[in-house]
Image (spheres, rainbow, N blue to C red):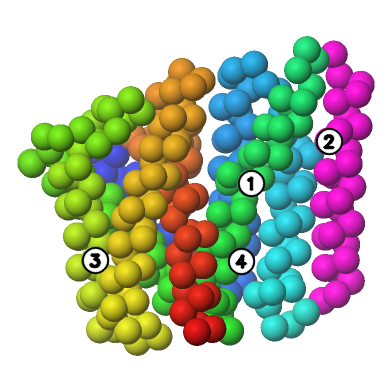
C-alpha cells in the first residue's frame, strides 16, 4: 500500500506537470507516453499467438502523431516536416506487409492486424486527447487538465462507491469487481468535479463541463472494460509493471482510450454549432 501511494503521488505530479509546463512539453510528453503504451500493448500481444512488428508500429504511430500535431493543432505549420511524416508513415505501413513475406509465421495477417490495431487502439485516442488542448485554437491546458481531473474523480468515486455500496454486478464476465453502484457513484463524483472546474475555467459553461464529465465517466468505464476483456483474452492480470503497485501504463490510461475521442467529438461539435 505504501509503494502504491508513493507511486500514485509521483504519477499525479508528473501528469500535472505535463499539462502545465507549456505546449512543447505537452506535445513531446504525450508522444512518449503514447509510444510507451503502444510498446506495452505489443508486448502483451506477443504473449499470445500473434507477433506484431513493434518497431514498424511505433514508427507508424509516431509519424501519425507528428503529422496531426504539425498540421491541425499547431499554428506554425512546417510543411517539409509534415510531408516527411506522411511519407514515413506510408512507407512503414507498406513495410509492415512486406516484412511478413520474409517471416516464418503461421498467421502473418494476425501479425499485421495486431500491428495496425495497436496504432488504432492506443495512438489514435492519445492523439484525440492531445487535440483537446487545441480544439479552441491556440494551446490551452484547461481542457486536457480538466479531462484528467474528471477521469481521476470518476475512478476514485467508482472505487469508493463500489467498496461501500456495491451490490449489483456491472459486467461480471469481464470485470467481476465492478458494480452499477460504483459506476453511478463515479459518474456523479466526476460531474461534481466538472461543475467545480466550470467555476475556474470558463471556456465551457457548467452544463458542458458536467456533460463532458458524464461522457468521461460512461466511456471511461467502457474503456476499462475493454482493456479487461483484452487482458482476459491473453490471460494476464496487469498490462505491465512500470508503475509499482499500479500495474502498467495501459492499466492507468484504459479509460482515456475510449473517452478521449468521444469527448473531443462532443467539444468539436458544440464549437461549430
The range drawn in magenta is: 78-104
Residue assigned mark 2: 96
Residue that appears at 77% across and 26% down: 109
Q: Is residue 63 left or right of residue 28?
A: right
Residue pointed to by mark 4: 27
Mark 4 to mark 3 CA distance (whole Å): 28 Å
Which SS class for mark 2?
Answer: helix
Mark 1: few/some/many CA within 10 Å (<14, 14-19, 20+)? some
For residue 26: magenta? no
**Pointer 1 and pointer 2: residues touching (CB < 8 Å)?**
no
Q: Which residue position is annotated with label 1?
A: 120
Q: How many labels does the image show?
A: 4
Give yes or no for contact between labels 3 and 2 (Cβ–Cβ under 8 Å): no
Q: Which residue is drawn at 43% across and 59% down?
A: 15
> Which is more N-terminal, label 4 or label 1?
4
The residue at the point 56 percent across, 27 percent down is: 44
Instruction: Answer left or right for 73 relative to 71.
Output: left
Residue 158 lies, with reference to residue 28, above or below; the image says above
Q: Which residue appears farthest toward the bottom when viewing the image?
A: 202
Q: Regarding mark 1 in the picture, which secondary structure is present there?
A: helix
Q: Distance between the residues labelled 3 and 1?
A: 29 Å
Q: Is residue 132 left or right of residue 194?
A: right
Q: Is residue 100 magenta?
A: yes
- Whichever of callouts 3 and 1 sits on the residue coming sooner in the sequence is 1
Instruction: Give the secondary structure at mark 4.
Output: helix
166 or 17, which is in the foreground? 166
Kindly indicate whether the residue at mark 4 contacts the one at mark 1 (C-beta within 8 angstroms).
no
Q: Which of marks 4 and 3 is nearer the N terminus?
A: 4
Could you say which is closer to the camera, residue 170 or residue 233? 170
The x and y percentages for residue 91 are 89, 47
Q: Which percent across, then down, holds residue 219?
A: 39, 52
Amino acid at each position: 500500500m505504501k509503494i502504491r501511494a508513493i507511486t500514485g503521488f509521483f504519477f499525479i505530479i508528473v501528469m500535472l506537470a505535463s499539462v502545465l509546463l507549456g505546449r512543447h512539453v505537452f506535445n513531446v510528453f504525450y508522444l512518449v507516453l503514447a509510444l510507451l503504451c503502444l510498446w506495452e500493448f505489443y508486448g502483451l500481444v506477443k504473449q499470445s499467438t500473434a507477433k506484431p512488428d513493434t518497431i514498424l508500429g511505433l514508427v507508424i504511430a509516431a509519424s501519425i502523431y507528428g503529422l496531426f500535431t504539425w498540421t491541425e493543432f499547431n499554428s506554425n505549420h512546417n510543411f517539409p516536416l509534415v510531408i516527411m511524416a506522411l511519407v514515413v508513415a506510408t512507407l512503414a505501413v507498406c513495410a509492415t506487409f512486406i516484412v511478413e513475406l520474409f517471416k516464418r509465421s503461421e498467421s502473418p495477417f494476425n501479425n499485421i492486424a495486431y500491428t495496425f490495431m495497436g496504432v488504432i487502439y492506443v495512438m489514435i485516442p492519445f492523439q484525440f486527447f492531445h487535440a483537446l488542448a487545441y480544439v479552441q485554437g491556440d494551446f490551452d491546458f484547461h481542457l486536457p487538465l480538466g479531462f484528467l481531473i474528471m477521469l481521476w474523480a470518476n475512478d476514485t468515486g467508482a472505487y469508493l462507491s463500489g467498496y461501500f455500496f456495491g451490490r449489483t454486478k456491472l459486467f461480471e464476465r469481464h470485470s467481476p469487481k465492478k458494480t452499477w453502484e460504483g459506476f453511478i457513484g463515479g459518474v456523479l463524483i466526476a460531474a461534481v468535479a466538472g461543475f467545480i472546474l466550470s467555476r475556474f475555467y470558463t471556456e465551457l459553461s457548467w452544463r458542458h463541463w458536467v456533460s463532458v464529465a458524464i461522457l468521461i465517466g460512461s466511456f471511461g468505464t467502457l474503456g476499462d472494460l475493454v482493456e479487461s476483456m483484452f487482458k482476459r483474452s491473453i490471460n494476464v492480470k496487469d498490462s505491465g509493471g512500470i508503475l509499482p503497485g499500479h500495474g502498467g501504463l495501459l492499466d492507468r490510461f484504459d479509460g482515456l482510450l475510449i473517452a478521449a475521442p468521444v469527448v473531443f467529438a462532443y467539444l468539436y461539435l458544440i464549437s461549430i454549432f
